[in-house]
Amino acid sequence: MQQLVATRSERRQAQRTAQESEELEQLLSTLTQANAPGGAKPVSLAVGQLLNHYPQKRLSPEAITQLIEDWIQDLGSYPTDVIFAACQAWRRSSKTIAPTPGQLITLAEPIMAARNFHIRVLHSVLEAQEATTEEVS
C-alpha cells in the first residue's frame, strides 16, 4: 500500500532489487539488439516478397539487381522485424501499387521512434538507479 501512495519522485528514487535492475538491464540489452540493422539479405527477402504482390513490367536482370541494391541502400539500416512489419502494413493497406522505399520508411519510423523512446527511458532509469546506489554507498 505504501508504494501506491508514494509520489512519482519517491517511486523513481526507490531502490530496486538486484533482480529488478538485472531485468531492466536485460530488457535494455534486448531492445538495443533488436534495433541492430538487418542488412542486405532480409531487405531483399522482404522486398522481394512484397513486390510479388504487385505485378509489374518485366525488368532485365541488371535492372532487377540495381533495384534491389537501391532498396538495400535505403532500408538496410533498419532492423529486420521492422522492415517486415512495414511490408506487412503496406500489404494490409488499401494500396494497389507497390511502395517506394520512402513509403516503407514512413511506416517504419514510428516503430523505431517507439523503440528508441523505450531505450532512452531504460537508460535514464538505470542511470538514476546507479546514481542513487552511489549516494547510498
Image: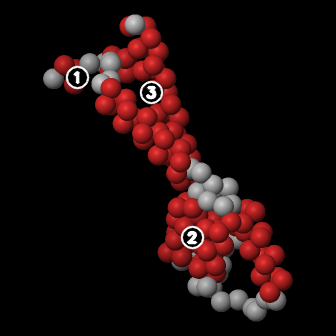
In the rendered image of this protein, does residue 6 appear above or below residue 91?
Answer: above
Q: Sequence-wise, which precedes: disc 1 or disc 2?
A: 1
- Say how the picture is coloured: secondary structure
Q: Secondary structure at mark 3?
A: helix
* Amino acid found under the numbered disc labelled 1: Gln
In the rendered image of this protein, does residue 99 appear above or below residue 19?
Answer: below
Residue that label 3 marks: 125
| Cβ atoms under marks 3 and 1 closer than 8 Å | no
Q: Secondary structure at mark 2?
A: helix
Q: Residue at x 32, y 31 (%)?
A: 20
Q: Residue at x 81, y 75 (%)?
A: 66
Position of residue 109 in the picture relative to residue 132 (left or right): right
Residue that label 1 marks: 3
* Amino acid found under the numbered disc labelled 2: Cys
Q: Is residue 106 visible?
A: no
> 10 Å neighbourhood of mark 1: few (<14), some, or many (≥20)?
few
Residue that label 2 marks: 87
Image position, residue 52 (x, y; %):
61, 85
* Amino acid found under the numbered disc labelled 3: Val
Q: Give the distance between the C-alpha atoms of the residues marked 3 and 1, in whole angstroms.
A: 17 Å
- Mark 3 or mark 2, which is nearer to you? 3
Q: Nearer the viewer, residue 76 or 97?
A: 76
Q: Quadrant of residue 102?
A: bottom right
Q: Sequence-wise, which precedes: disc 3 or disc 1?
A: 1
Q: Give the distance between the C-alpha atoms of the residues marked 3 and 2, in whole angstroms.
A: 33 Å
